[in-house]
Image: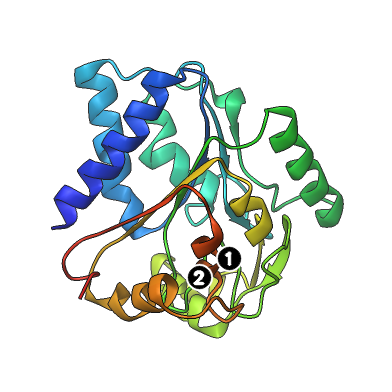
Amino acid sequence: DTNAACNLVAAIIANAIKEKPDLVLGLATGRTMEQLYARLAEMHRNDGLDFSRCRTFNLDEYIGLPVEHPGSYRYYMNHHLFNNINIDPANTFLPDGMAADIKAGCAAYEQKIAECGGIDLQLLGIGADGHIGFNEPLSSLCSRTRDKTLDESTIKVNSTLFDNPDEMPRSAITMGVGTILDARSVVLLATGKSKAEIIAKAVEGPVTSMVTASALQFHQKCRIVVDEDAAA
């Protein structure tokens, strides 16, 4: 079930941190991750899971939302994880959706990942259209961090998370598919019946830019964790 799936992914992350205390962790947002982050915070509180030397890079951030906006991913990460663990805020990185020069900001983000030695473990969710990060259908499978216009289906789903759906941005900065594939290991978490069809396409279907998650079939150390509903 969902609980077991989240606990398993939390254990994978916790074990990786215990093996390498200065782990570079790629992080994701979304409803699926909220329970996972609550579990990691609990492991920090109760079991002493230590994030003090970790560095984190988030997959994406909306363009044009200030960090204090409740819809921004910086706000989401602070609320659901960073404020509840012992991580140094200076070691938590997200793309800068308010940058004066977005393209330069994207290049700087790639550079920062490289300076930290690359991502050790990348956490992913999957969108209903098969996107990882905001790599919408027809994204290049060797793409790097860049700005991306959001698909109408993504806007429809994500706008429900805004008090005023009209505030939902139409574009975002996202790590590219190529950036994600560079991570030394990947774990994708998907739960619920709504993800069953797209998980089947990503895992068993042809590798195609129409389903960017299908590129994970090329990764040498990728795990997909699903509950029974998402495995249907």
Residue 57 vertical placement versus 134 (above, below): above
**Picture disc at residue 214:** 2
Residue that badge 1 annotates: 134
Label 2: few (<14), some (14–19) or many (≥20) C-alpha neighbours in 10 Å: many
Residue placed most toward the observer, 208 or 51: 208
The answer to whether residue 176 is seen in the rendering is: no
Horizontal side of 231 relative to 84 (left or right) equals left
CA distance for labels 1 and 2: 14 Å
Q: Tell me which corner region of the image, top left, top right, bottom left or bottom right, holds residue 147.
A: bottom right
Horizontal side of 110 relative to 157 (left or right) equals right
Q: In which quarter of the image is the C terminus?
A: bottom left
x and y percentages locating residue 78 in the rendered image: 45, 37
Q: In which quarter of the image is the N terminus?
A: bottom left
- Dot 2 lies on which element? helix
Q: Which residue is drawn at 61% across and 68% down?
A: 135
What amino acid does circle 2 point to? Ser
What amino acid does circle 1 point to? Phe
x and y percentages locating residue 193 in the rendered image: 22, 75
Q: Residue at x 58, y 44 (%)?
A: 183
